[in-house]
Amino acid sequence: MTISQIMLRPVRNKCTTANSVRAVVNIAAIGMRLRIGWVRRPSFSTLGSVASRLQWIHVLFVIEYTSMIDLYTWTTPNGRKVSIMLEELGLPYRAIAVDINANEQFKPEFLAISPNNKIPAIVDHDTGISLMESGAILMYLADKAGRLRGDGKNGWQTVEWLMMQMGSVGPMLGQAHHFLKFNRGKSDYAEKRYGDEAKRIYGVLNKRLGEAEYLAGDYSIADIATWPWIARYEWQGVDFASYPDLKRWYRAIAARPAVQRGYHVPKEVTPIPMPA
């Protein structure tokens, strides 16, 4: 067991006049986090009849102990789904960068967690469960926290639109990136095919979001899965002006603090794109 990081930050205790300092200790080997606090509490004593002095009593106490989730990820739409979800839920996690440009996804230690050599993947040290595939991870985390999946009809609508993302939005917009962003000019057929498919998908999403505030009615894992892919609209040759309801949805989600934090995990590359 090794201590990987110790962070100290002063905190003002609003209930008393005490000043406290909390330490967050991450134990990397087993994915645990300890919060330890030191409190300096004032007390007064009188010296003779004319003077007083301030004495400080030092108290050491443990505030919290939790198991962490290890998130193996990179700065892609699929990776950002899970970091955004973890930020929305407020679950403790540690982001571990897997640089796919350097082929780190093929290392044996990562393949032991994600046999399909794809990010993201998680290891939940609380339950001992490891998972690959972003859709499965989102469903797992929603069940773990009891949030953002819905129930009854709303729950099945969430699954329906999540599957739409997994089966259409991600794969087809990914192909649009390949031919329209990285290999333009190599295949007129492929550029037209996937450019047209991107526009068709945008139309489907725009129609749905003209009927509901979010894809499943309430904000859910369906939105969290879909939004990072739409965040690359500049790569897809799409004019947002033709999709006003999708644009409204996109801007609303981009304004969420958890989305803003999760977008920049494991590192900040560019600001969140914002349509005019």
Image (spheres, helix red, strand yellow):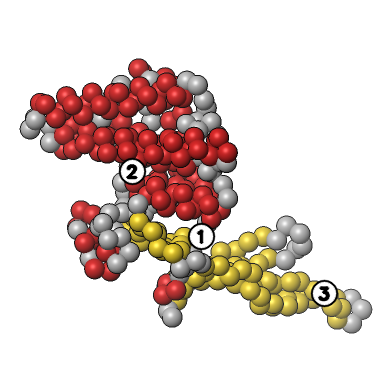
Q: Secondary structure at mark 2?
A: helix
User: What is the three-letter code of the residue carrying label 3?
Assistant: Phe
- Label 2 and label 1: CA atoms lie apart by 21 Å
| Image location of residue 261, percent across then percent down | 45, 47
Asked if residue 276 can be seen in this view, the reply is no
The quarter of the rendered structure image containing the N terminus is bottom left
Label 3 or label 1, whichever lies nearer to me, is: 1
The residue under label 1 is 92
The residue under label 3 is 44
Vertical relation: 13 (above or below) 168: below
Asked if residue 187 can be seen in this view, the reply is yes
Give me the disc on residue 65: none
Q: Nearer the viewer, residue 257 or 144?
A: 144
Vertical relation: 73 (above or below) 17: above
Residue farthest right in this picture: 49
The residue under label 2 is 77
Side of 14 where 92 appears, left or right:
left
* Label pair 3/1, CB-CB below 8 angstroms: no
Q: Secondary structure at mark 3?
A: strand
| Image location of residue 184, percent across then percent down | 12, 32
- Label 3 and label 1: CA atoms lie apart by 40 Å
Residue visible at 69% across and 72% down in the picture: 40
User: What is the three-letter code of the residue carrying label 2?
Assistant: Pro
